[in-house]
Amino acid sequence: MAVSRARRKALSRVFIYVAAIVVAAGILAPPVWLFISSISTQSELLSVPVHWIPHHPTFERYARIIRAASEGGEAEVTFKRSMVNSIIVALFVTALCISIGTLSSYAFARLPIRGKTQLLFMILFIYMLPPIAVVIPLYEIMGRLGLLDTHIVLVLLYSAFLTPFVIWIMRGYFLTIPKDLEEAAMIDGCTRVSALFRVVLPLSVPGLVATSLFCFLMSWEEFFMALIFTSSPAAKTIPVAIAEFSGRHSIDYGMMATGGVLAAIPPVLIALLFQKYIVSGLTSGAVKG
């Protein structure tokens, strides 16, 4: 009996390890194949059967992008400029969404607001609204304001769509913080605003960091609006620049893969650095809603 139980335990452990390996392989396979494609020669990329391991690996494409200003083609120069554009847009969107969304979510979590539930669901509806449904009127408005093909138009649009996400996530996080702490601070002389900044926000750092990271990543990878509202290297972001490696009559798969690898580096580094805040922030905010 004891032997049978030990065998079942060993089998279940083997099953868990096998399942973990299968899941890890499924997650890691796309980025690994992306990197292999980026260092393969054009002939190996198009060869049949497929070369899983390149016979003549080369980092020439990375060098072309790094030397883009002096030696690269137009697409490489655009890609390098788009990296800077993406960083600017993502940072401003994150700052704007966190500033507005955090204060709004605190109000929804703590203050008595008439029709609070209806307002929250209306905000959620805005977040779930597909961009294709509003892109034409938004294009008209931004065109009349003279904001097309600028960083400002992307910052405004991304912030409008991501602020509801911040409100819902941070509201759930604020609900996990006991009201007694704020009431004790107010008894000691704090106003509600000073209690927010001295007590609530310091306790909400994991949630703020996790939400900020998601805002950064979502604005970093957004493609549709960037494609519609930008048209020159002055404002194009990375997803659009990568798409431009494909022309009308040919597609440079190697440069697209190289661009994909370089574009993935900042989000991956940020996620690795702040992974504990991502897990703790989202799980804490999910307790109450």
Image (cartoon, helix red, strand yellow):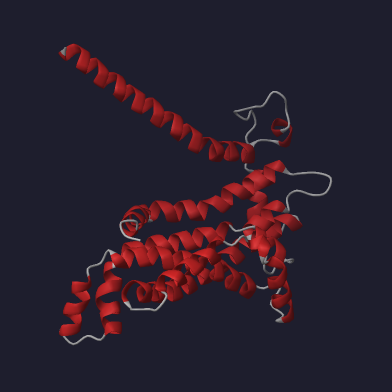
Image vertical order of residue 208 relative to residue 253, above or below: below
Q: Nearer the viewer, residue 45 or 229?
A: 229
Residue pushed farthest right? 249
- For the C terminus, the quadrant is bottom left
Q: Nearer the viewer, residue 8 or 278?
A: 8
**Residue 258 appears at what percent x and percent y?**
63, 46
**Residue 225 appears at what percent x and percent y?**
66, 63
**Residue 170 appears at what percent x and percent y?**
38, 66
**Residue 277 appears at what percent x and percent y?**
34, 57
Residue at 67 percent of width and 52 percent of height: 242
Quarter-wise, where is residue 169 in the image? bottom left
Image vertical order of residue 246 relative to residue 203, above or below: above
Q: Is residue 199 left or right of residue 123?
A: left
Q: Nearer the viewer, residue 240 or 109?
A: 109
Residue at 70 percent of width and 55 percent of height: 76
Residue at 39 percent of width and 60 percent of height: 210
Residue at 65 percent of width and 35 percent of height: 40
